[in-house]
Image: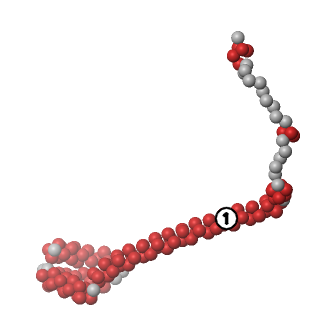
Amino acid sequence: MGNSQSASSQPYVVQNPRSYPIGLSSVLVEHLDSKKADISRGITLESHIQSRVHAELKRLELLESEAFERQASELSKINIENDSGLNSTILSNDIANLKKKLEKRPKLRELDGVNQVRENLVGCLKLHEHRPLECWKEVEDFKYGQIIFE
């Protein structure tokens, strides 16, 4: 049952390879047999690889130089924009505006009483150089004078 279906109806044809002549030229056989061909193929392959690597390096260097030039131009534009604000006329105008604002602010005036209390404290501390605790009353007067002044 299984044999009849698997069997092929055509007979096998086997060819003897020795009966057919091989038609290769002697030049081709010598070329394939020589060691010189392997070396020259290796050299050719190596030079091809080196040329591709060199071309890729040139391409990358070109890309890098373009990126560098782009960044340098962007930075120079930013510097030009920043430097325009540092003009001497602009700075002198800013200084004049600040002076006007300071003149408008209320000025502090020192009270004569505060100066007198401060002089008393300094005199006491000089008199009792090694014993500053003896000037406790002058310190309290100075603190009170500062509170009133503020």
Please state if 63 lies on the left or on the right of 1 as rendered.
left
Where residue 69 sits: x, y (%)?
Answer: 44, 75
Residue in the image at 85% along x and 36% along y: 16
Front residue of 73/129: it is: 73
Q: Secondary structure at mark 1?
A: helix
Q: Is residue 119 above or below residue 54?
A: below
Please state if 62 lies on the left or on the right of 94 as rendered.
right
Where residue 37 sits: x, y (%)?
Answer: 79, 61
Is there any visible trace of residue 44 in the rendered image?
yes
Q: How many marks?
A: 1
Task: Indicate the amino acid at tag 1.
Answer: His
Residue in the image at 18% along x and 83% along y: 97
Please identify the residue farthest to the top as the structure is shown: 1
Residue in the image at 81% along x and 51% along y: 24
Where residue 59 sits: x, y (%)?
Answer: 54, 69
- Tell me the quarter of the image containing the C terminus: bottom left
Q: Is residue 39 above or below residue 116?
A: above
Q: Which residue is mark 1?
A: 48
Is there any visible trace of residue 131 in the rendered image?
no
- Tell me the quarter of the image containing the N terminus: top right
Please state if 4 lies on the left or on the right of 118 as rendered.
right
Where residue 20 sits: x, y (%)?
Answer: 84, 41
Please identify the residue farthest to the right as the structure is shown: 18
Front residue of 93/17: it is: 17
Label 1 crowding class (10 Å Cα cut-off): few <14, some 14-19, many 20+? few
Tell me the quarter of the picture where residue 108 sits.
bottom left
Tell me the quarter of the picture where residue 5 sits.
top right
Front residue of 131/37: it is: 37
Q: Is residue 16 above or below residue 118?
A: above
Colouring convention used in this rendered image of the protein: secondary structure
Tell me the quarter of the picture where residue 116 sits.
bottom left
